[in-house]
Image (tube, grey):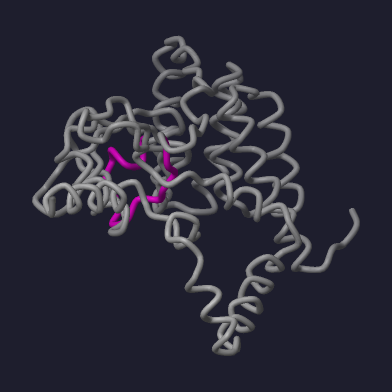
């Protein structure tokens, strides 16, 4: 096997891990298993890859191979709850001669982003509980308001983690207005839980305003030369700051309705409209 520089190997691992997760979300378990094996060829001690391989093999009905994958994960990390739980579960089924549970397909439509109606986020303050270790892609969770906090819990009401502060404050106001949301796990391990939040009901007070700022511009930037757009914009800003008085007057002369300012979030636009109505 060719030897790659450490940085290239790490980049390759990240890329293949993302590919394996994406394939699992689409229920392409054969391909997911193969990608995880490729990761293990490069990184034989990668516990997450063994867990993902065990999941894929379980979904394919290859339970003995799945047990081997989880057993290797436990050998490398005896405290890994995901591997331990699945190894015990599969071992118990084998001992009892029971059939393993049917595969639980993940509907890929759950993960389709809709501009303004969905947002992806990583939970904070993730609780290291049995409920958290059982999470997998496609599991539905619930939003729960606790005072000035918005937490995410499973179907039994067991708290999993908290929405990150900036998004949390937006959600509090949206929920107060009457909006409703669904939450689904997109990826999870013992320390990290990623979810997609989807608007399921828009309150009349919101009108046609979306819940979340569209992310299309960010997605386009991700595929351009790294860092170039941001640096170019910063250079333009610096040039504008050095403009003479005459040029500044020309800028001020632009009609207000044609000015392009900082894009408001849906909530900021709503608040501005409410303030305008109150002043009249």
Q: Is residue 163 above or below residue 225?
A: above
Q: How many marks?
A: 0
Q: Is residue 243 left or right of residue 252?
A: right
Q: Is residue 109 left or right of residue 236?
A: left
Residue 227: x and y in percent read 68, 68
Question: Could you say which is closer to the camera, residue 246 or residue 40?
Answer: 246
Q: Which residues are magenta?
A: 118-134
Q: Is residue 260 left or right of residue 40?
A: left
Q: Dividing the picture into quarters, in which one does residue 38 lie?
A: top right
Q: Is residue 201 above or below residue 270?
A: above
Q: Is residue 124 magenta?
A: yes
Residue 180: x and y in percent read 24, 30
Residue 105: x and y in percent read 50, 18
Spot the residue most to the left: 147
Q: What residue is shown at x 34% (from left), y 37% (from top)? A: 209
Q: Is residue 170 above or below residue 228?
A: above
Res. 268 in view: yes
Question: Could you say which is closer to the camera, residue 56 or residue 263?
Answer: 263
Res. 127 in view: no
Q: What residue is shown at x 69% (from left), y 24% (from top)? A: 30
Q: Is residue 188 magenta?
A: no
Residue 139: x and y in percent read 38, 29
Q: Is residue 209 left or right of residue 109?
A: left
């Amino acid at each position: 096997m060719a030897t790659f520089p450490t940085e290239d190997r790490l980049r390759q691992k990240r890329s293949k891990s993302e590919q394996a997760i994406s394939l699992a979300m689409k229920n392409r378990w054969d391909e997911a298993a193969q990608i995880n094996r490729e990761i293990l060829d490069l990184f034989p001690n990668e516990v997450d890859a063994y867990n993902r391989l065990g999941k894929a093999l379980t979904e394919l009905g290859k339970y003995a191979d799945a047990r081997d994958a989880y057993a290797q994960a436990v050998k490398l990390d005896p405290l890994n709850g995901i591997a331990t739980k699945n190894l015990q579960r599969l071992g118990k089924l084998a001992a009892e001669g029971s059939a393993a549970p049917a595969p639980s397909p993940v509907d890929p439509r759950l993960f389709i982003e809709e501009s303004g109606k969905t947002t992806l986020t990583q939970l904070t303050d993730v609780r290291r509980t049995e409920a958290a270790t059982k999470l997998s892609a496609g599991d539905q969770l619930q939003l729960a308001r606790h005072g000035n906090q918005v937490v995410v819990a499973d179907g039994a009401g067991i708290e999993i983690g908290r929405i990150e502060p900036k998004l949390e404050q937006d959600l509090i106001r949206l929920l107060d207005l009457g909006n409703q949301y669904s939450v689904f796990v997109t990826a999870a391990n013992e320390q990290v839980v990623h979810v997609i939040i989807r608007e399921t009901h828009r309150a009349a007070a919101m009108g046609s305003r979306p819940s979340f700022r569209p992310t299309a511009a960010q997605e386009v930037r991700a595929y351009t030369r790294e860092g170039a757009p941001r640096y170019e914009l910063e250079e333009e800003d610096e040039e504008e700051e050095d403009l003479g008085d005459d040029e500044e007057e020309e800028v001020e002369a632009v009609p207000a309705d044609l000015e392009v300012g900082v894009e408001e979030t849906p909530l900021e636009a709503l608040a501005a409209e409410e303030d305008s109505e109150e002043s009249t």
